[in-house]
Image (cartoon, coloured by chain):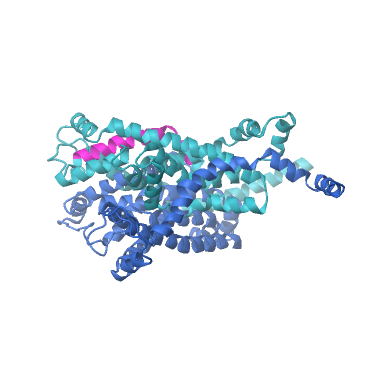
Amino acid sequence: MTATTSASIVARRRDVRDVRDVRAGRRHGAWSRIQPVVALLAVVLLIGMPLWIVVVTAGKTQAEAFSPDLTPPATWQYAENFSAVWQQGRVPAAFFGSLLVMVPAVAGVLALGSLASWVLARRSSRLMAVLYALAISGIVLPPAVVTIVLLLRQLGLAGTAVGMIGVYMGMYMSTVIFFVTGFIRTIPAELEEAARVDGAKPLRVFGTIILPLLAPVLSTATILICLYVWNDVFYAFFVVGGRLDTLPLNLFQVASAGLYLDNWHLIFAYVLLMSLPLLVVFIVAQRRIISGITSGAVK
Amino acid sequence: MPPARPSASRRRTVRPTTYRHRASHPARYLIPAFAVLGVFFFVPTIFNFVYALTDWSSFKSEIGFVGLRNLEDLVSSGTLLTSLRITLVYAVLVAVFQNLFGLLLALLLERDTRINRFARVMFFIPVVMSALAVGYVFQAILKPDGAANSILGVVLGQEVTIPWLGDTTWTLVVVALIHSWKWMGLSMLIYLAGLKTISEDVLEAARLDGASSWTAFRDIRFPLLAPALTFNVATALLGSMNGFDIAQATTGGGPARTTELLNIFIFRTFGQGLFAQATTMSLVLFVVVVALALPVIRTLRKREEVL
């Protein structure tokens, strides 16, 4: 009796679903057949063409590259162009300069930011609320780029990697504290109790219980901050311009010299060289990067 | 001694939890983060207010107080209002274009097929690239004898010589479009995540009620995308108000300074050694961002609460 009823319900449900599918199908049938074509066409026109121009122009001679277009070069001369920018743009020095600034800045801002977030998330008082508001204000407020230079001069850090690292840490501390504090509030405080009863010191509780749980939010923050720091040129100009090589700073230098001579083949070769590291990282880890960014943003 | 006892016992009964939180989450852990924030963020911001009132420059060693003279100079020369107007127009254009493109892409690539996953990755590539590099690429493509005009020429069957980056009115729009092209992949991802959170049942119900896909989008899906819209509009506005790389690489502020954003002005005057003017403009940017971003975020948040 019950079996037949439930079977008929299932059957009826299936009917409803069929009707829905038919309706939806009739309405969206044409679109679902055209959609892949539209999607691919959009990729080719909006992304493929500009990237293709970069790829072919980077392999041309100076004369051929004078006005960059879609035609492939008569002979590909990546070797010549790459070795030219390798020296002119001091690529190895710039690459290590970029790394030298990015790695400590990102590691430092994540470590100090998440430690502070833990306290801000767990303690609730008026003072903590004020401190939290102050800590996340940097998300909106633009950094005072000119007076940063003055301050760094007074501290004797002007033009140094340490100064640049500090400036990036100050700029992205708010982002880290915002994301991590929000995340820690979703972790039950009871998880910490067991370790505390065992007599673990606060820093140990943080390191063994909280920090491992922060992996998803920290990886999202790492990706975003790496992206910004690696590609930053504006703040680098003010803080280390002319004193330290970074990839974007040297691109600006190559391009400023190249534009004068219309050396598009060298500029594009540099663009290609400089984009490759991040592109490779992105392609390898694209699934994690995309899910990390989307999970962090819409809350 | 006796008076101390009652208070001690009261403390023990009233504050066990707060006491425990104090010991287990010591406030001294805030010190390193706030030290970095203080030295590298708050102190320079305070300096901004101070040094905008001085004649600090690379031409003399001492720094003297001049009051509001820098601000008056920038206002009377018209530079302040021009740069401000350019930056605001740019920010609004970027916010509109970037969200429009991002939303269209998200709707186009919504279904989870292999082609769509591939397309999403491709549209994210410009986000990963350096904005400076993107700017140079488009400077080359948009040259009068560049690829854009030659492709248009082939399509239209006649020679096209549009000065994309040499027009005193429209170049700002072109630069805003390039900025939006670079970041539309990020907006797309956020909108895709927002679309995923909308339950299929609601849409089925609308469909059974005979709603067309446009009505369903306008009345159900778009309002439910409010959190994604907030995030995207706020980040696009903040990103373009602080914009520099793309405008610098495509036009350098030209033609005739019609694309000179506040940050390009700051960069240029700083390079000329006019530090106080650069500081004053940086302060203007600070005030404008506070005055503009906070109300926008509050309004958008309110829109979310209505749901």
| Residue A41 in picture, x, y percent from top left | 33, 46
In terms of secondary structure, what is the magenta stretch mainly? helix
Residue A53 in view, yes or no: no
State left or right for residue A5 relative to residue B91.
right
Foreground residue, B234 or A152? A152
State left or right for residue B251 relative to residue B218.
left
Rendered colour, chain A: cyan
* Residue at image point 86% right, 49% down: B6
Q: Is residue A269 shown in magenta? A: yes
* Residue at image point 83% right, 48% down: B4
Magenta range is A265-291
Quadrant in the rendering for residue A52: top left
Foreground residue, A5 or A70? A70
- Total marks in image: 0
| Residue B94 in picture, x, y percent from top left | 38, 57
State left or right for residue A293 relative to residue B9.
left
The C terminus of chain B sits in image quarter: bottom right
Q: Is residue B79 shown in magenta? A: no
* Residue at image point 43% right, 34% down: A103
| Residue A201 in picture, x, y percent from top left | 67, 31
| Residue B298 in picture, x, y percent from top left | 54, 62
Rendered colour, chain B: blue
Quadrant in the rendering for residue B258: bottom left
Residue A138 in view, yes or no: yes
The residue at the far left in this view is A63
